[in-house]
Amino acid sequence: MSTAIEGKDWNEVISVVQKCFDDLRKDSDRIYMTLQMDYRAGAENRIEGKIKSVEEKL
């Protein structure tokens, strides 16, 4: 299971990761997190494109 996030720059993305971590820390004694990144210059709205592609196939 994973969660995908997309942002305009590194600071925007890592800010979301930090907020999620801080919220989890309130209720958890242990947090296991793996961060995987895919940077593509000039690429925008990739998540939307993937959703649209799946919907077209259904």
Image (tube, rainbow, N blue to C red):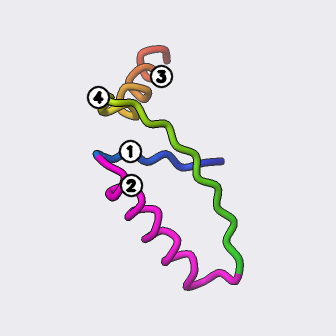
Q: Mark 2 highlights which residue?
A: 13
Coordinates of residue 37 in the picture (x, y in percent): 52, 43
**Mark found first going from the N terminus, 1 or 4:** 1
Main SS category, magenta section: helix
Q: Tell me: 1 left or right of 22.
A: right
Task: Give the secondary structure at mark 1.
Answer: loop
**Mark found first going from the N terminus, 2 or 4:** 2
Crowding around mark 2 (Cα neighbors within 10 Å: few <14, some 14 to 19, many 20+) is: few
Task: State how far apart marks 4 and 3 are (Cα).
Answer: 23 Å
Q: Amino acid at mark 1?
A: Glu
Q: Mark 4 highlights which residue?
A: 42
Q: Which mark is residue 6?
A: 1
Task: State how far apart marks 1 and 3 are (Cα).
Answer: 18 Å
Task: State how far apart marks 1 and 4 are (Cα).
Answer: 13 Å
Task: Give the secondary structure at mark 4.
Answer: loop
Q: Nearer the viewer, residue 5 or 14?
A: 14
Task: State how far apart marks 2 and 4 are (Cα).
Answer: 16 Å
Crowding around mark 4 (Cα neighbors within 10 Å: few <14, some 14 to 19, many 20+) is: few
Q: Amino acid at mark 2?
A: Val
| The residue stretch that appears in magenta | 9-29
Crowding around mark 1 (Cα neighbors within 10 Å: few <14, some 14 to 19, many 20+) is: some
> At 49% across and 77% down in the image, what residue appears?
22
Q: Mark 3 highlights which residue?
A: 54
